[in-house]
Image (cartoon, rainbow, N blue to C red):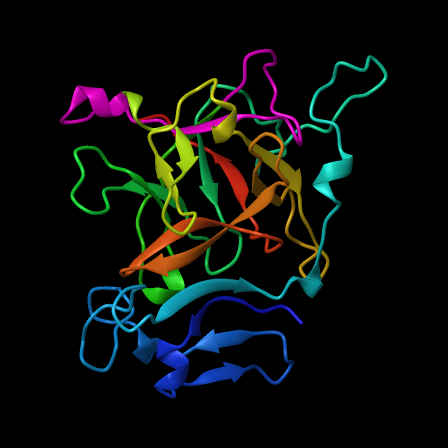
Amino acid sequence: MVALIWAPVGGWAAMGLPLCFAPSGDLLCISAAAVGDGGSPVRDGGSPVGMGGGGDTLCLVSFCQSFTWDNPIVLPTTTHDDNLVLPAVLDQDGDPVKIGKEYIIETPIIEGGSVYLDNIGGHKCPNGALLHIPSLGLTGDGTPVKFILNDDLVLREMYAIHIMFSVRTSSCTSCVNQTVWKVGDEKDFLVTGGTVGNENTFFKIMKLEMEALPDLKNVYKLLYCPPQLVCKDVNGGFDNGYPRLQVIEDDPFPFVFVKAKDV
């Protein structure tokens, strides 16, 4: 069974909002009534569903029986062995992803939402890595990213890399240098403000085979891989009405890479 949704824990389920399965058993959906006029999930009283207050949480859930992946612990992270060539990460055109080039990170499910940069909490610089969810009315353009690596031109699976939003202009010039991904202190959400060269901001990319959806090609999962620790998957969850990327153990979410169009 394939069922990947932004699924309720607490709030929506307790309110009795309808969840339904298609007759085939392949699709799990949420009633559109659960989305407010502004595109954010709401309670009966009209306030956004978040992680504060009553503790209602909306989490991104994947029924991973439909996915297969290898244990990242057993794979090498470099190509120093002359006999070893790790597979290149491919974009949606089937081309190798190039280091330093701009790409949009999208998900091939939930109608193809894209990852974007936004300001959460009124900070000086935009600081949050979020995901558009068209099925919930949360739409918009993705923010281009670049993959940073010192010693190769092509991104390969399980390379330790930095990921940064590629921001061309900003009202605050210092913000342009504050776009490297890292994991924040609160609930393991992804935020910006990381540093290139800092091993605590390393991510890796690994092929994700979606057996139940064989027509999807070049699908990958993102991993957060700090030194001396087991890698964790990048998935997502809602926080105060924002659909944010979040590090979760053993719960991968599918992503694809699309060349960013020249602006």
When the figure is inspected, residue 103 is found, relative to residue 115, above or below; the finding is above
Q: What is the residue that sits farthest to the front in this orientation? A: 228
- Where's residue 101, x and y in %? 47, 22
- Where's residue 242, x and y in %? 30, 56
In the foreground, 86 or 76: 76
In the foreground, 123 or 254: 123
Q: Main secondary structure of the magenta part?
A: loop
- Where's residue 81, x and y in %? 81, 15
In the foreground, 216 or 124: 124
In the foreground, 117 or 58: 58
Tell me if residue 59 is in the magenta stretch.
Answer: no
When the figure is inspected, residue 199 is found, relative to residue 54, above or below; the finding is above
What is the quadrant of the C terminus in the image?
top left
User: Can residue 35 be seen?
Assistant: yes
Q: What is the residue that sits farthest to the left in this orientation? A: 171
Residue shown at the point (67%, 47%) measured from the top left: 208
Q: What is the residue that sits farthest to the bottom in this orientation? A: 16
Residue 226 as seen in the image, left or right of residue 101: right
Residue stretch rendered in magenta on the structure: 148-176
**Labels in figure, total:** 0
Residue 154 as seen in the image, left or right of residue 40: right
Residue shown at the point (67%, 54%) measured from the top left: 215
User: Can residue 31 be seen?
Assistant: no
Tell me if residue 163 is in the magenta stretch.
Answer: yes
- Where's residue 122, x and y in %? 16, 43
Residue shown at the point (76%, 33%) measured from the top left: 75
Q: Toward which corner of the image does residue 149 lie, by quadrant?
A: top right
